[in-house]
């Protein structure tokens, strides 16, 4: 089983943002399990944490690894 990493993405604020982030992660990590919580601005992803972070950044957002 892959490790899960959670990012806080403060500039992800709406459904369009969520769709963009999910799409970027699907392109970068097609087999990843992605969970998004808009109310807390968090994204959890299974798989390669660095690739996930880069994909979110390339989509125009500012992910920070959650503690």
Image: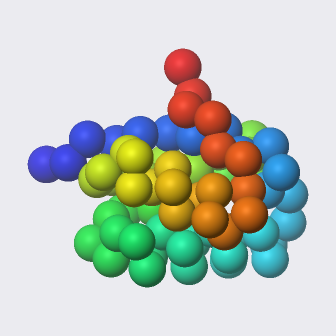
Horizontal side of 25 relative to 29 (left or right) equals: right
Q: Is residue 39 visible?
A: no
Pick whichever, 66 or 57, lies toward us: 57
**Residue 30 in which image quadrant:** bottom left
Determine whether 51 is above or below 25 in the image. above
Which colour assignment does the render follow? rainbow
**Residue at 50% from the left image edge and 39% from the top image edge:** 6
Determine whether 63 is above or below 51 in the image. above
**Residue 15 in which image quadrant:** bottom right
**Residue at 74% from the left image edge and 63% from the top image edge:** 60
Residue lying furthest top in this view?
67
Residue 45 at x, y percent in the picture: 42, 53
Determine whether 16 is above or below 36 in the image. below
**Residue at 38% from the left image edge and 45% from the top image edge:** 49
Residue 5 at x, y percent in the picture: 41, 40
Residue 25 at x, y percent in the picture: 48, 69
Residue lying furthest left in this view?
1
Pick whichever, 55 or 41, lies toward us: 55
Residue 32 at x, y percent in the picture: 33, 65
**Residue at 57% from the left image edge and 28% from the top image edge:** 66
């Amino acid at each position: 089983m892959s490790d899960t990493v959670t990012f806080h993405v403060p500039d992800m604020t709406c459904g369009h943002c969520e769709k963009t982030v999910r799409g970027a992660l699907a392109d970068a990590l097609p087999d990843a399990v992605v969970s998004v919580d808009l109310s807390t601005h968090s994204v959890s992803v299974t798989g390669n944490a660095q690739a996930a972070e880069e994909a979110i950044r390339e989509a125009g957002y500012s992910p920070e690894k959650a503690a």
